[in-house]
Amino acid sequence: MAEGQTRRRGAALEEAILRAAADQLTETGFAGLTMDAVARRAGTNKNAIYRRWPDRLALGIAAYRQIARTVQPPDTGSLRADALEMLRRANQHWSSPLGAILRELLAAAGGTQELLTQLADQSAESVAAPWLIIIGRAVARGEAPPEALHPRVATVAMVLLRNEFVTRGTPTAPDETLVEIVDEVYLPLIRNRAP
């Protein structure tokens, strides 16, 4: 430990480890994420990491969750434009280097249900929050009824986009598909939620 540097513990150490792991993931992908590299970057030892995460996959998922929390929803003044922007961002994300990391993590998790659940829990949480924000703004502007503020309703467009990725097997969908999802399914669903 360098002179004048105090030993980090608890939340401060965990934050340093997650930041180091997120940086490592961003630079090298999951393939380059090692406990040694993260320990060096965080200025700690591997034991400190293993006490919090049992293996590099669990650490990778936690680091990805850290990265994914930074997404801010658009605020264009229109529900349609906000929804399209959200889908376009997701489309770009899935084919981006960060999306590649997510695909690597999903592949590495394979059938490990506990780890897939961690990704799914974060995914559901992180996907619903910005959609609920844009619908909340639409409700305030009178574009949507308050009944539309439901997580399952809010995330329908994203679920349909994910289905496109799965059924097409490619990490991007054509823009016409995004417009169709918003205009033909999402907006009618939102507008018809009134009692």
Image: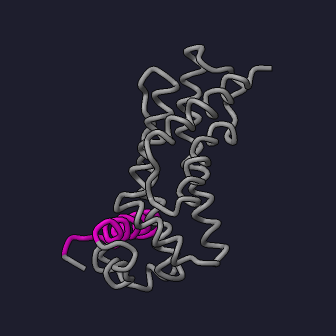
Q: Residue at x 37, y 79 (%)?
A: 31
Magenta highlight range: 3-27
**Image position of 191 (left or right of 41):** right
Q: Residue at x 50, y 82 (%)?
A: 55
The image shows residue 66 at horizontal and vertical percentages of 44, 58
**Image position of 6 (left or right of 112):** left
Q: Report which quarter residue 193 is drawn in.
A: top right
Q: Is residue 81 above or below residue 113?
A: above
Q: Residue at x 28, y 74 (%)?
A: 41
Q: Report which quarter residue 35 is drawn in.
A: bottom left
Q: Is residue 15 or residue 177 the one in the foreground?
A: 177
**Image position of 192 (left or right of 169):** right
The image shows residue 34 at horizontal and vertical percentages of 37, 82
The image shows residue 25 at horizontal and vertical percentages of 35, 69
Which quadrant is the N terminus positioned in? bottom left
Q: Is residue 181 or residue 150 the one in the foreground?
A: 181
Q: Report which quarter residue 153 is drawn in.
A: top right
Query: Is-magenta flag for residue 21?
Result: yes
Query: Is-magenta flag for residue 66?
Result: no
Q: Is residue 43 above or below residue 69?
A: below
Query: Looking at the magenta stretch, what is its main secondary structure?
Result: helix
The image shows residue 154 at horizontal and vertical percentages of 63, 37
Q: Residue at x 45, y 72 (%)?
A: 104
